[in-house]
Image: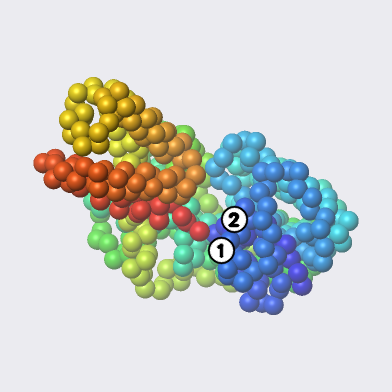
């Protein structure tokens, strides 16, 4: 069997890809960034689903099924419409001519929520229902695994906080998480059998647990001490979600808050009755020992935006200083360069504009990995240049060039933290 897997580089997508490959299925992985999947040994097709003009006919040749695990929790309404509705509809249309026998759509529990994510996901379900190809729609509950991403990473981060255990609202919202491999097993069942065709199924685990219980259990799993529960008022949570949308803070978003506000819980008895599956419960999912990587990731997760905004603040102030500091205040220190005051002023103002550009890029989250490399080149370049041309700057009483060494390290850490896949 050969399948075309959309969204193959996502958290759920990767688990499905590995599970199906281990089960003997030939997987063609479709994603915006396919470099890692290619290195992992998969056949890949690089495609951005926000581009609805792609010709899918050739990509579908020889494919027996389509698994659509593509999705975006955050983004503009236009981007979500393209990824959840328009591009999949184009692919399904091409699939009819290519003789594709089945479509499995990974949707989400709670798509009834009045959010751009919910509305476009619901429209995406209608698109697959209108495709004239046998289909199964899967609306999984919260998906967990040994690794984490997005909402599950945020949960681990909240569990690792010192001094308090925060929840969105009172923490009573119910969850029944399912392991990503157990969800992948359901996908494989959909491919192997026609008994589930035409159905909407909500995969979940057998163990229902509240948000607070889940965070406390995760905290104990990480080996952290018990702390006071702090319930974040929904008004504050919505404000934080709004801020997360504007500053592109990943899972901190209005959509994530809306999902947490209503909980992510389904009907296990119905799921079991439809599929016969008996997936792992939450206690079994976190039954393994937590490792160093788990603790480091949980504790670094919320430090990641602090690193980003700390660098942004540094570049903002540095840029303003470069633009407005009088020439007399820095001309003497740079006298060994042999430049006139006019040329030194031009140099300072140019550097100020560059620094403000870095600050703006960090604020807007513009290609953060690439931006980090530009910062490394800029700081490293002028550190070497000024260090060689004006070596006295290394000995300035307030640090001078010496401060650039930890700054370079911080930018490097920022670069590492921003590469999630």
Residue at disc 2, secondary structure = loop
What x and y, as percent, mark residue 378? Answer: 37, 43
Horizontally, is 274 left or right of 243 in the view? right
Labelled disc at residue 33 = 2
Q: Is residue 393 above or below residue 207?
A: above
Which quadrant would the N terminus be assigned to in this image?
bottom right
Horizontally, is 243 left or right of 107 in the view? left
Residue drawn at 40 percent across, 37 percent down: 358
- The reply to whether discs 1 and 2 touch (Cβ–Cβ < 8 Å) is yes
Q: Is residue 35 above or below residue 323?
A: below
Horizontally, is 88 left or right of 254 in the view? right
What x and y, as percent, mark residue 309? Answer: 35, 40
Residue drawn at 79 percent across, 47 percent down: 90
Q: Residue furthest left?
A: 397
Q: Answer whether residue 136 is visible to the viewer in this image.
A: yes
Residue drawn at 18 percent across, 42 percent down: 393
CA gap between label 1 and label 2 equals 8 Å
Q: Is residue 316 above or below residue 7?
A: above
Q: Is residue 10 above or below residue 323?
A: below
Residue bearing mark 1: 36
What x and y, as percent, mark residue 65? Answer: 77, 63
Viewer-proximal residue among 345 and 79: 345
Viewer-proximal residue among 43 and 199: 43
Labelled disc at residue 387 = none
């Amino acid at each position: 069997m050969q399948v075309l897997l959309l969204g193959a580089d996502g958290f759920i997508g990767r688990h499905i890809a590995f599970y199906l490959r281990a089960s003997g299925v030939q997987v063609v992985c479709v994603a915006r960034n396919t470099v890692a999947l290619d290195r992992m040994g998969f056949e890949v097709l690089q495609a951005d689903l926000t581009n609805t003009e792609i010709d899918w006919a050739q990509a579908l040749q020889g494919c027996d099924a389509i698994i659509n695990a593509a999705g975006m929790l955050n983004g503009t309404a236009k981007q979500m419409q393209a990824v959840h509705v328009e591009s999949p509809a184009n692919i399904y249309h091409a699939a009819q001519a290519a003789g594709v026998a089945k479509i499995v759509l990974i949707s989400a529990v709670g798509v009834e929520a009045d959010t751009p994510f919910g509305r476009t996901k619901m429209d995406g379900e209608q698109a697959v229902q209108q495709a004239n190809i046998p289909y199964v729609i899967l609306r999984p509950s919260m998906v967990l695994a040994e690794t984490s991403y997005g909402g599950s990473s945020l949960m681990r981060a909240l569990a690792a906080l010192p001094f308090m255990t925060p929840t969105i609202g009172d923490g009573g919202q119910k969850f029944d998480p399912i392991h990503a491999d157990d969800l992948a097993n359901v996908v494989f069942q959909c491919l192997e059998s026609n008994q589930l065709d035409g159905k909407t199924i909500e995969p979940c685990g057998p163990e229902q647990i509240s948000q607070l219980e889940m965070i406390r259990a995760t905290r104990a799993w990480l080996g952290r001490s018990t702390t006071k529960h702090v319930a974040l008022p929904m008004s504050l949570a919505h404000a934080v979600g709004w801020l997360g949308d504007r500053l592109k803070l990943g899972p901190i978003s209005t959509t994530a808050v809306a999902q947490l506000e209503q909980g992510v819980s389904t009907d296990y008895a119905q799921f079991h009755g439809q599929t016969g599956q008996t997936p792992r419960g939450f206690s079994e999912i976190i039954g393994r020992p937590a490792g160093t990587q788990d603790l480091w990731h949980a504790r670094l997760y919320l430090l990641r935006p602090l690193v980003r905004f700390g660098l942004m603040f540094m570049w903002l102030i540095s840029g303003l200083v470069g633009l407005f500091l009088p020439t007399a205040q820095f001309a003497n220190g740079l006298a060994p360069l042999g430049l006139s005051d006019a040329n030194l002023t031009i140099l300072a103002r140019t550097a100020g504009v560059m620094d403000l550009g870095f600050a703006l890029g960090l604020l807007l989250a513009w290609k953060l990995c690439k931006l980090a490399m530009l910062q490394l080149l800029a700081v490293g370049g002028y550190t070497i240049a000024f260090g060689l041309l004006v070596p006295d700057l290394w000995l300035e009483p307030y640090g001078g060039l010496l401060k650039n060494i930890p700054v370079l390290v911080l930018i490097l850490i920022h670069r590492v933290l921003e590469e999630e896949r």
